[in-house]
Image (tube, grey):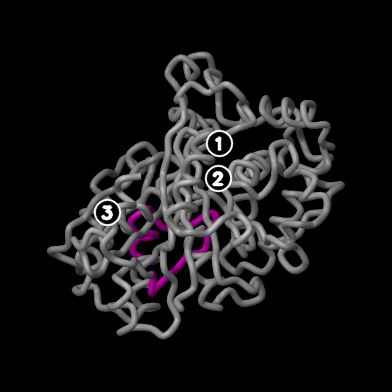
Amino acid sequence: MSTNEQQTERVALIGASMTQFGQREGWIMDLLAEAGLDCLEDAEVDATDVDHLYVSNMASGEFEGMTGVMNALVHDLGMMPAYTQRVDQTSSSGGAGIYAAWQSIASGASDMTLLVGGEKMSHRSTPETTDIIASVTHPVEYKTGVTLPSFAGLTARHYLERFDAPRESLGKVAAKNHENGVDNPNAQFQKAVDLETILESPIVADPLRLYDFCPISDGSAALLFCPEDVAQEYADEYAVIAGIDGATDTHVVHEREDPTIMNAVVESGEGAYEMSGYGPDDIDVAELHDMFTILEFLQMEGLGFAAQGEAWELVEEGYTERDTGELPVNTSGGLKSKGHPLGASGVAQGVEIYEQLVGEAGPRQVDADVGLACNVGGFGNCVITTIMEAAR
């Protein structure tokens, strides 16, 4: 795409942070400030050195009646007169924030850009939260009561029947991600769940059950971006964005030719691969948007890690296991275990890939030089794919 072709700077990441995800006492500004301060401290960069501040957030107005969070955060962090902008791309707001921060550095407009993503959701009832999230659907779909979980259930049923996949394969995605979350001190759920419990949990949208869905979460995460030559002044170990791209699919889900293909995943992945020079076989670790377990299959296939209809077989074979698989997927625990504070999730994916590449993932650490994050908005309506590499 033209934006990628015009890149003038190699964009590095020199700091990262993630707050505890789950049910938090603080409000959105408390969460954003916590992640922002922690990220600056991690990079040993002063707030006054930041030129641009981006805030990834989907619905602070709807959840808390508060807008202007980006302006308030510049004030709270002592960053005046830094340029600021709120980035809203529904549940892919975090990935869109990474794209915006990358553009600000790559264009030469900024030498130091802070991205903070966050959402405060748990104080609202489940029906209220579901309704706010469902507003991302097309108005015609919304009026009929369609929600993202219902799309997930319909797609999962179609996938299982079309590709003769066992129901257990989806359960194994949930079990794997919960097991990974045990080793993430900031994950909402740090508890392993066995396959039997997953398969016997209450049905939410047939054939998907309770453990096929991510939780309602509060939390925030942050990343600090700069040109690579600036990064070398601050750190010996850092990561570089090797490729990034975004794409959009139909707003009306039933207009898609094949519901098991997320075209925006395919397109953004191809753009990120082309820019980076890497391909699916070069990726050492991946963070995928498992808001529902079926999405892990669809993204694996859309990104070229598996042929269409065959991702479930790789999961069955252990291909995506953290310690023994060829491609560890969702070493953070994924949205399923780590949690899904909407605006924070894509940023937290970036945090996990960054920490894997610089060797700071602790007990979750895998051998990785190249990592990929795929952040999905709505039911594949908009997608950002980011490829990072360890500094050479």
* Residue position marked by numbered label 1 in the rendering: 126
- What number is the disc on residue 216? 2
Considering only order in the chain, which callout, 3 or 2, is on the residue closer to the N terminus? 3
Q: Is 103 in the magenta?
A: no
Q: The residue under label 2 is which amino acid type? A: Ile
Q: The residue under label 3 is which amino acid type? A: Gln
Residue visible at 43% across and 76% down in the picture: 238
Quarter of the view holding residue 229 = bottom left
| Frontmost residue, 49 versus 241 | 241
**Residue at the extreme right of the image, as rendered:** 196
* Residue position marked by numbered label 3 in the rendering: 6
Q: Which residues are magenta?
A: 13-34
Query: Could you say whether the residue bearing mark 1 is in a helix, strand or loop?
Result: helix
Q: What count of labels does the image hold?
A: 3
Q: Is residue 310 left or right of residue 122?
A: right
Q: Is residue 32 left or right of residue 337?
A: left
